[in-house]
Amino acid sequence: MTHTWLVEIQKACNIKNLGSEMKRNKFILVFIFLIFVVIAVGASFFILTSTISKPISLAIYVPQDREDQSKNYKTAPSKLTLILVNDSTIYAYNGNDPASVKKFNYKTVRQEIISNKHLTIVIKATKKSTYKKTVDILDEMTINGVKKYVLQDASEEEQKITEQLTNAIECFS
């Protein structure tokens, strides 16, 4: 039962059923809205996943190699050498005498670094030291504001001394 005015409008506009025309328009609007939502969610997903997947790394600043300063730390008496032995042991000595080593662990070495941060700190890794502990020591340099430090492999003499000390400590344990 339609109203007479609605019938007159339908005849004038040559529309057979005005109710179905309105339903079709609502359907088109809902369809357009759903397309917009899908595009917005898809764009958000790709933006989020592309920012999450970016690698995060530690920046290491390497100074320019100059002839007059490149070998200075090797003979300097004002240096602290840290030898990373294994997951729990660090040996340290001042100056150029590896025979005067002191034993530290990764928790107690911070005090030694803080008290000697004005010196050049030479970090030497042995074959038994791990990558994680090397990064931990580099973090300590950054945390404690050490300005000059060098990372290199331990010499044969230092390797022998640390092996002898480690074996001697294991014998007494």
Image (spheres, rainbow, N blue to C red):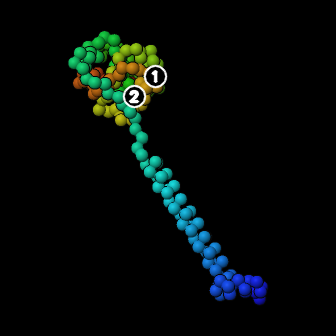
Looking at the picture, which amino acid does disc 1 mark? Asn
Q: Residue placed at 38% from the left, 17% from the top?
A: 102
Q: Which mark is residue 144?
A: 1
Looking at the picture, which amino acid does disc 2 mark? Leu
Helix, strand or loop status at disc 2: helix
Q: Residue placed at 77% from the left, 85% from the top?
A: 3
Q: Which mark is residue 123?
A: none
Q: How packed is label 2: few (under 14 Cα within 10 Å), some, or many (20 or more)?
A: some
Q: Residue placed at 68% from the left, 81% from the top?
A: 19
User: Which of the two residues, 164 or 60, is positioned nearer the viewer here?
Assistant: 60
Label 1–label 2 contact, CB within 8 A = no
Q: Residue placed at 59% from the left, 73% from the top?
A: 28
User: Which of the two residues, 23 or 79, is positioned nearer the viewer here?
Assistant: 23
Sequence-earlier tag: 1 or 2: 2
Helix, strand or loop status at disc 1: loop
Q: How many marks?
A: 2
Q: Which residue is mark 2?
A: 138
Query: Can residue 8 be spotted in the picture?
Result: yes
Q: How packed is label 1: few (under 14 Cα within 10 Å), some, or many (20 or more)?
A: few
Above or below, 127 against 18 in this view is above
On the image, which quarter does residue 147 sit in?
A: top left
* Residue 20 percent across, percent down from the top left: 65, 82
Which residue ends up furthest to the front in the rendered image? 12
Query: Can residue 83 be spotted in the picture?
Result: no
Q: Quadrant of the C terminus?
A: top left
The CA distance from mark 1 to mark 2 is 10 Å
On the image, which quarter does residue 10 sit in?
A: bottom right
37 displayed left or right of 111 = right
* Residue 123 percent across, percent down from the top left: 34, 24
142 displayed left or right of 76 = right
User: Which of the two residues, 50 or 17, is positioned nearer the viewer here?
Assistant: 17
